[in-house]
Image (cartoon, grey):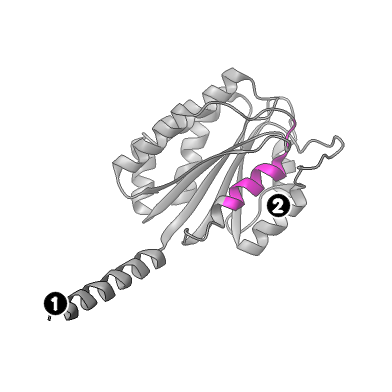
Amino acid sequence: MRKALLFVAAILAVMTAVSRSQACVDTALVLAVDGSGSITDEEYEFQKSAIVSAFRDTAVLLAIRSAGSVAVAAVFWGDGEIPSQKLGWFVMDGMKPSEQFAREIERNQRTAFGNTNIGGGLWAALDLLSNPQLCARRLIVDISGDGMETSAPRRGHWTPLLQARRRADEMGVTINGLVISDEETDLADYYNKSVIMGPNRFVMDITKIEDFARAIRLKLIRELS
C-alpha cells in the first residue's frame, strides 16, 4: 500500500512539473535601453529612474493586470565589444513582482558604453526571449535610443542590425521604439524604416530626455493594452 501511494505521489509530482513547464504567460516584454557613449551618466540614471517610476505607476500596473500574465526583463546595451547587461525575468502577477523589478533596475550599475550597436542590443533581448524556460503567446522588444546604428568599421562581436531583425522576424517578435531625437531629428524615420517590425509596431518620438519618464509610461500602457 505504501509503495502504491509513493508511486501515485511521484506521478502527480511529474504531472505538476510538466504542467508548470508548459504554463505560458500572455506577454513577454524586454526593455532594451541605450547605454552607448552618447548617453551621459546623468541620462543613463534618468532612464533608469523613469523605468522604476513606470513600474510603480498605478496606470501601468492596471495595464499589466488587464494584459493577463506578463513577464518583463531588461537589457542595457551599447558597443558590440561590451556584453549587454541583462536583467530578468520577472512575472508580473501582482504588486510585489513589479516592485522587485523596479528595485533590480535601481540597483543596476552601468557597464554599457561605446558605439551604438542597436543590432547587438536587439540580439541580447532576443536571447532572453528564446530562453527555453520561457513560454509566451506574445513577444515584444521595447528598444530606446538616441542615435542610429554606428557605421564605423565592424569588429568581431558586432551584430548587424539587419541580422538581428531577421532573427526577430523568424521568432515572431514585435519590436517597438522610443527615440530621443534631440540631436538627430530624423531618428524616428530611421527607426520606422530600419528598426521596428511586427504586428502593431510603433515608434514614440521625444525631443528631450526629460520627456522619457512620461513616454515610457505611455508606451508600456499602449503595448500592454
| Label 1 secondary element | helix
For residue 13, what is the image quadrant?
bottom left
Which residue occupies 70% across, 25% down?
37
Q: Which residue is mark 2?
A: 164
Q: Residue at x 35, y 53 (%)?
A: 66
Disc 1: which residue: 2
Q: Position of residue 161 (x, y in %)?
A: 75, 47
Q: Is residue 2 above or below residue 93?
A: below
Mark 2 to mark 1 CA distance (whole Å): 55 Å
Q: Nearer the viewer, residue 218 or 14?
A: 14
Task: State the image quarter where residue 210 is shown.
Answer: top right
Please tell me whether the stretch drawn in magenta is mainly helix, strand or loop. Answer: helix
Q: Residues within 10 Å of mark 1 (few under 14, many from 20)?
A: few
Q: Secondary structure at mark 2?
A: helix
Looking at the image, can residue 201 be seen? no
Q: Residue furthest left?
A: 1
